[in-house]
Amino acid sequence: MFDPTAYDNLKTVIEGLLYDKDLEGVINILDRKDMLNMSTMSREFHLAFALSDQKNAQLIFSLYASLENLASELLELEDKLDLVGANVKLTIVVRHENKQEIIELLQDLLRKIWGTEQIIKQEIRYQPFGSDNIVTNHITIVFSRLVTEGHIDDLAEMTDYMLATLAGLKRQKLLVDLGRRE
């Protein structure tokens, strides 16, 4: 009989939590990717969403398990049990004027919600030949530990934090709608 891996169980739980929010009308699921990389034998799951009436931001929840993570669990390698689980990363996509104070405001907002333990990085992308001063900011929040089946209850709390993040961004008048090009 097939015994699902920690990755499978975590993916199923987060999918259920987020699709329930979609059915309740709280969020809109914008994209979903479930990938197996045959060259590295790794698995990735990405689910992009925004609040149901939000146009200025989207959040992508990503779950990743490497061959080492999966093999440690499937082969029950005693010396590698600390590798059982999956990595979680959040990517937030927003657009705004290319101003340092906006970048700092976003960093502060995310630190207030997610704390200082997580690594928060901002990657600014812009059109070098564009006539506006609008940039696309890809903000990643990387969690410093593997998520295991012992953390399944934390996924519900993480969902609340993701919704709070989107709500906080929705209130920011300095952000430009993602679909609008200046």
Image: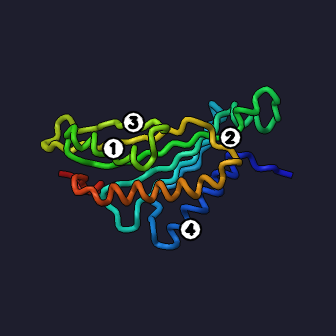
Label 1 sits on what residue type?
Asp
> Label 2: which residue?
85
Secondary structure under tag 1 reads: helix
User: Residue at coordinates 48% horizontally, 55% vertically from top-left?
Assistant: 161
User: Residue at coordinates 66% horizontally, 48% vertically from top-left?
Assistant: 151
**Camera-nearest label, 1 or 2:** 1
Crowdedness of circle 2 by 10 Å Cα count: few (<14), some, many (20+)? many
The residues tagged by marks 1 and 4 sit, at their Cα atoms, a distance apart of: 30 Å
**Camera-nearest label, 4 or 3:** 3
> Label 3: which residue?
121
Secondary structure under tag 3 reads: strand
Secondary structure under tag 2 reads: loop
From the viewer's perspective, is 84 left or right of 31? right
Q: Nearer the viewer, residue 2 or 157?
A: 157
Q: Which of marks 1 and 3 precedes in the sequence?
A: 1
Secondary structure under tag 4 reads: helix
> Label 4: which residue?
20
Q: Which of marks 2 and 1 precedes in the sequence?
A: 2
Label 4 sits on what residue type?
Asp
Q: Which of marks 4 and 1 precedes in the sequence?
A: 4
Tell me if label 1 and label 2 are in contact, CB under 8 Å.
Answer: no
Label 2 sits on what residue type?
Gly
Label 3 sits on what residue type?
Lys
Q: Position of residue 72 (x, y in %)?
A: 76, 33
Which label sits on residue 108?
Answer: 1
